[in-house]
Amino acid sequence: VNRRLMAPDISALKGDRPIVALTSYHAHTAAIADKYCDMLLVGDSLGMVMHGYETTLPVTMDMMVVHGRAVVRGAKRALVVVDMPFGTYEESPSVAFRNCAHVMKQTDCGAVKLEGGRRMAETIRYLVDRGIPVMAHVGLTPQSINVLGGFKTQGRTRAEWAAIEEDARVVTEAGAFSVLLEAIAAPLAARITASIPVPTIGIGASSACDGQILVMEDMLGLSPRVPKFVKKFGAVATAIEDAIKSYAEDVGSRRFPEEQHAYGMKEPEGAPSAA
Ligand code: KIV
Ligand code: NA
């Protein structure tokens, strides 16, 4: 298609080809990722990656709006999905609608994502019925870290499967256009992917998913610590450090700036000024 992708375009890719997604928080990297990705997620992981928090819990709607706008401006073709932060959607469908509509109006994003399965189904239905495409997020839900007791892989015993499968099924029935599966055992991801009609996008959820997503800074090799499921496709931290080290050396030894980096005068040199 020759326009920006919309939520139904993403849904339609299931069974056709793998869906490529990345997180994105700022305009220049969004413009690069836009050439290769179907979907860019302005994840609330930006609280950890961009702002140095330990968890995603302190993230605010204002932060999501600032970064969401930047990504929508930077990307021309990919669907931009913005995460709803902790505390902005759980209370009730109407509170969720008010806050999701605010984020959509302020950023011009094409969809929102929220964490939770069965407990969010009524809200997802309410939002979709009122014009807001919703991506659901089940498995490991980092906004619940204080209840879960850590960033723990889900569904590694069969006893856990039924609840997670039910989560994925119910959010799909509620109208979610896609379901993000985070950190779940591979055979469970395969079962869910085979049983729901909308695409699963996996992060730490095996190749069985209909698409994949990673946090951009993690796959670029910029983040200092990454989970087991991350493959580093670049070494950006090393590239940045090398460049900053060279800059410091050149400034320290006056090798930078050179003549080509400086401005000359418009007037001939040596002519005394009238004043
Ligand atoms: O915030 C985020 O980066 C996410 C990931 C699971 C992609 O939600
Ligand atoms: Na998130």
Image: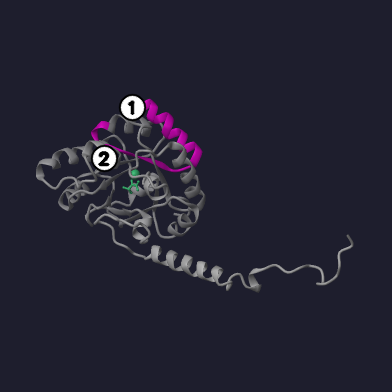
Of residues 239 and 112, the one drawn nearer to the viewer in this rendering: 239
The residue shown at (40%, 30%) is 97
Residue 255 placement: quadrant: bottom right
Residue 196 placement: quadrant: top left
- Asked whether mark 2 lies closer than 8 Å to ligand 2, one says no
Residue 130 placement: quadrant: top left
Say few, some or many: other residues with alpha carbon within 10 Å of mark 1 (under 14 / 14 to 19 / 20 or more): few
Ligand 2 is found in the corner quadrant, namely top left
Q: Please tell me whether mark 2 sits on a helix, a strand or a loop.
A: helix
Of residues 197 and 167, the one drawn nearer to the viewer in this rendering: 167
Q: Please tell me whether mark 1 sits on a helix, a strand or a loop.
A: loop
Examine the residues drawn in magenta and state their main secondary structure. helix
User: Mark 2 = which residue?
Assistant: 145
User: Mark 1 = which residue?
Assistant: 91
The residue shown at (36%, 34%) is 128
Q: Is residue 269 above or below residue 79?
A: below
- Is 95 part of what is drawn in magenta? yes
| Residue type marked 1 | Glu
In the rendered image, the quadrant that contains the C terminus is bottom right
Q: Position of residue 170 (x, y in %)?
A: 23, 36
The residue shown at (81%, 68%) is 267
Q: Position of residue 56 (x, y in %)?
A: 35, 42
Q: Is residue 45 above or below residue 216?
A: above
**In the image, 144: left or right of 96?**
left
Q: Position of residue 200 (x, y in %)?
A: 27, 48
